[in-house]
């Protein structure tokens, strides 16, 4: 079963269970998936679905930070609940140590020497770790690995 099918099944289950908040979040995710399919005229595979889920999670985290700074605890709670629903669709994430090891291996493989090679390294790392790692942590690991 593809990830998109799983999300659709979860939407149906949320409807039956009358879980309004969960249902709203899943519908939002399905709308984002459909938008991508229509805009780019493609059929989404699991990697593309994970990329969209990652994007939505990043938006939620940014919103939580902004609402928290503004003292809007009600909106922080709403965004946090959506974040939990979305995170259920991601594969297990790599730890910081596993990310560092993967980045060091790619830097060695590409022969990257310094910060000027960051774009080349990030491109290779994104392909290898897409969906399995937080890209913020990956970027920091690449910067550390390329320090002179």
Image: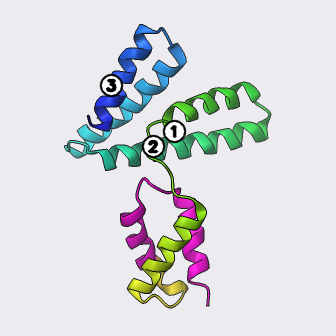
The residue nearer to you, when weighing 41 against 128, is 128
According to the image, label 2 marks what residue?
A: 90
Q: CA distance from mark 2 to mark 3?
A: 15 Å
The magenta span reads 119-148
> In percent of the image, x 51 and y 13: which residue is there?
19
Residue 133 in magenta? yes
Label 1, residues with CA under 10 Å away: few <14, some 14-19, many ≥20? some
Split into 4 quadrants, where in the image is the N terminus?
Answer: top left
Q: Position of residue 46 (x, y in %)?
A: 30, 45
Q: Are marks 3 and 1 in contact (CB under 8 Å)?
A: no
Q: Specify whether 85 is left or right of 76.
A: left
Residue 122 in magenta? yes
Residue 119's quadrant in the figure?
bottom left
Q: Earlier in the sequence, mark 2 or mark 3?
A: 3
Question: Eyeballing the image, is 115 above or below 78?
Answer: below
Residue 68's quadrant in the figure?
top right
> In percent of the image, x 36 and y 65: which residue is there?
127
- Prevailing SS of the magenta stretch: helix
Q: Are marks 2 and 1 in contact (CB under 8 Å)?
A: yes
Q: Which mark is residue 8?
A: 3
The residue nearer to you, when weighing 39 against 129, is 129
Q: Specify whether 132 is left or right of 48.
A: right
Q: CA distance from mark 2 to mark 1?
A: 5 Å
According to the image, label 1 marks what residue?
A: 87
């Amino acid at each position: 079963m593809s990830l998109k099918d799983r999300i659709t099944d979860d939407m149906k289950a949320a409807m039956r269970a009358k879980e309004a908040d969960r249902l709203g979040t899943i519908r939002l995710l399905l709308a984002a998936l459909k938008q991508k399919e229509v805009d780019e005229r493609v059929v989404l595979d699991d990697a593309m679905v994970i990329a969209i889920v990652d994007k939505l999670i990043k938006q939620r985290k940014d919103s939580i930070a902004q609402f928290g700074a503004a003292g809007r605890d009600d909106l922080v709670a709403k965004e946090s609940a959506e974040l939990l629903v979305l995170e259920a669709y991601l594969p297990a994430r790599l730890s910081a140590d596993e990310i560092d090891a993967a980045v060091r291996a790619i830097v060695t493989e590409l022969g990257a020497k310094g910060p000027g090679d960051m774009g080349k390294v990030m491109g290779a790392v994104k392909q290898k770790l897409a969906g399995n790692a937080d890209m913020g942590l990956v970027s920091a690991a690449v910067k550390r690995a390329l320090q002179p």
